[in-house]
């Protein structure tokens, strides 16, 4: 806009919901000769090039030499996980020294210094270098182990003694590769998810007061979107409020008529919790053809003049992603980032266990004879595998802590009214089935699954790294059946407000089939699931429940 005149008006701009408007003053009649961009104040836009002036502009008045643009993310998938979640936006670069947020730090355990972008460059180059070295050793091992097996087979079938020297050479080579893999593997794994560690090592990233909360807009145009403004020349970190992963994200950068070949742009950083082989940005060109943008092999830099809209880099070790937004390619201003599900380090793929009929004669966990492959009952720390044809009955009430339990056949918890404790870092119902009671015969006793592990501990894998599941997880790609005692009253409401620390609650309904010792889940009134609570019933008197303290 231009040629504006104000008479007896101290307030020149007033923003309204959703506070996404961007105003540019072409001639200085709204702002002044040096500051012509006007935008609503948000934490991530509070930079040295802008002056906050609520009285006159209801927000920020920014230098004419920068550009303010808008990013829209609409129809994120999976919608059932992402719809209605707020988006958090953080400026990774400069923050105004006058900002209270630099003084008001939460949590108080945040470090005192910030070096996020420098740290990212170091983490990225080191982790990718280690991963590439590891992949080379995997390839070297496979090549020499295959050649070794072929040489052994030829020697055994022909008696050709000339193969003996080759056998020794190949064996030495794959043994050396094994040693290298053993050294490199923990080094690579030490970088898994390291991008997230910036929350504990960088003040700017750690401080929750620095983040701007962007609400999800379900009925806006386009429907189901987050929209936020950015200032050119800066880098921003985004994530959903509860860290939910996505399978596809459609992005739009401002409007074509506003970009005019803008080259400076911004870089957006984000992460993905589950390890993923690749993300592919795809846009539609002027002929209607879907075009993939080839990912870059190193961190993006705003100073790199060769970068253009949609250029993208993924580090699938640290799970850090970054993408350039600018006006250099009008066809790319809208694109969709799609997840490739193949998971690797050491190669994608891997074979599933062979098909087979489940045997009719059951095996019992407590019998050594049941474990035909290992010849022993599993002990603490083992990787337990229920083979594809096995019909295993768990008849041991108290299991030790296993590293993993993989089920390819059938594992049935004995339904004798007793209590069974199953302990493991990971339980994977892969191609088989785990049965805890049936619809006809619900479990009579109690089955307690205790999962172990912390973020700092080694990630657990299956099938030569085809599947990574972290730890403390029950993963199911087969059949998992759990039938407990039928409950008539599954949920009800509080009849009166429950105060903090209350040991009794009053219900709307009478819980005729609840019992002392049952555990209750008490949901929050709002959307924040962290406000939920759990309690054990101590006594029941009509609609009044006394809780264990």
Image: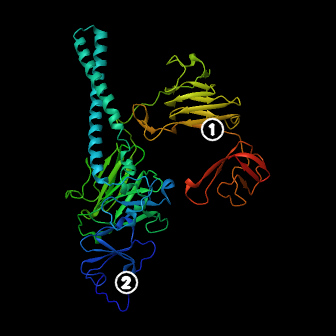
Helix, strand, or loop for circle 1?
strand
Mark 1 — residue?
Answer: 482
- Is there CB contact under 8 Å for labels 2 and 1? no
Res 317 seen here: yes
Q: Measured along the vertical axis of the image, is residue 85 above or below residue 26?
A: above
Q: Nearer the viewer, residue 434 or 273?
A: 273
Question: Which of the numbered marks, if any, corresponds to residue 4?
Answer: none
Residue at x-position 35% and y-position 52%: 202
Where is residue 398 drawn, in percent x and y?
A: 61, 28
Residue 291 lies, in percent from the top left, at: 30, 54
The residue shown at (56%, 24%) is 390
Residue occupying the far right of the picture: 542
Tag in front: 2 or 1: 2
Going by the image, does 541 lie left or right of 180? Answer: right
Q: Which residue is mark 2?
A: 12
Displayed quadrant of residue 176:
top left
């Amino acid at each position: 806009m231009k040629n504006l005149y104000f008479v007896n008006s101290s307030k020149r701009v007033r923003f309204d919901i959703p506070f996404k408007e961007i105003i540019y003053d072409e001639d200085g009649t709204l702002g002044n000769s040096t500051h012509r961009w006007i935008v609503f104040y948000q934490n991530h836009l509070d930079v040295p090039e802008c002056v906050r002036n609520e009285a006159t502009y209801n927000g920020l008045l920014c230098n004419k030499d920068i550009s303010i643009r808008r990013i829209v993310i609409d129809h994120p998938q999976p919608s059932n996980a992402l719809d209605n979640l707020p988006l958090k936006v953080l400026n990774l670069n400069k923050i105004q020294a006058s900002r209270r947020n630099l003084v008001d730090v939460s949590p108080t355990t945040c470090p005192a210094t910030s070096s996020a972008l420098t740290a990212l460059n170091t983490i990225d180059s080191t982790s990718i270098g280690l991963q590439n070295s590891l992949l080379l050793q995997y390839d070297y091992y496979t090549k020499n182990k295959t050649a070794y097996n072929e040489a052994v087979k030829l020697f055994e079938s022909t008696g050709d003694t000339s193969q003996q020297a080759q056998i020794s050479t190949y064996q030495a080579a794959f043994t050396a590769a094994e040693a290298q893999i053993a050294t490199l593997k923990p080094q690579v794994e030490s970088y898994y998810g390291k991008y997230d560690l910036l929350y504990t090592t960088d003040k700017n990233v750690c401080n929750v007061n620095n983040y701007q909360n962007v609400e999800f807009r379900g009925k806006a145009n386009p429907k189901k979107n987050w929209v936020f403004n950015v200032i050119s020349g800066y880098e921003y970190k985004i994530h959903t409020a509860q860290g939910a992963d996505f399978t596809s994200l459609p992005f739009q950068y401002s409007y074509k008529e506003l970009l005019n070949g803008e080259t400076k742009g911004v870089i957006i950083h984000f992460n993905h919790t589950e390890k993923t082989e690749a993300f592919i940005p795809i846009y539609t060109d002027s002929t209607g053809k879907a075009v993939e943008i080839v990912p870059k092999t190193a961190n993006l830099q705003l100073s790199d003049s060769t970068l253009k809209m949609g250029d993208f880099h993924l580090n699938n070790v640290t799970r850090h992603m970054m993408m350039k937004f600018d006006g250099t390619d009008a066809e790319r201003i809208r694109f969709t980032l799609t997840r490739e599900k193949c998971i690797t380090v050491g190669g994608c793929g891997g074979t599933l266990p062979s098909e087979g009929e489940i045997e009719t004669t059951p095996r019992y966990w407590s019998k050594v004879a049941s474990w035909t492959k290992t010849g022993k009952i599993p002990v603490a720390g083992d990787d337990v595998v229920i083979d594809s044809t096995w019909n295993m009955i768990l008849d041991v009430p108290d299991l030790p802590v296993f590293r993993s339990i993989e089920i390819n056949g059938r594992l049935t918890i004995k339904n004798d009214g007793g209590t069974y404790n199953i302990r493991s870092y990971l339980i994977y119902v892969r191609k088989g089935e785990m049965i805890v009671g049936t619809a006809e015969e619900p479990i009579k006793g109690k089955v307690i699954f205790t999962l172990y592990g912390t973020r700092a501990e080694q990630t657990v894998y299956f099938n030569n790294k085809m599947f990574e599941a972290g730890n403390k997880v029950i993963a199911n790609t087969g059949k998992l059946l759990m039938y407990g005692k039928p409950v008539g009253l599954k949920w009800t409401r509080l009849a009166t407000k429950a105060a903090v620390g209350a040991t009794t609650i009053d219900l709307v309904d009478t819980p005729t089939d609840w019992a002392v010792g049952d555990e209750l889940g008490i949901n929050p009134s709002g959307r924040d699931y962290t406000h939920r609570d759990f309690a054990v019933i101590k006594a029941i008197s009509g609609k009044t429940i006394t809780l264990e303290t």
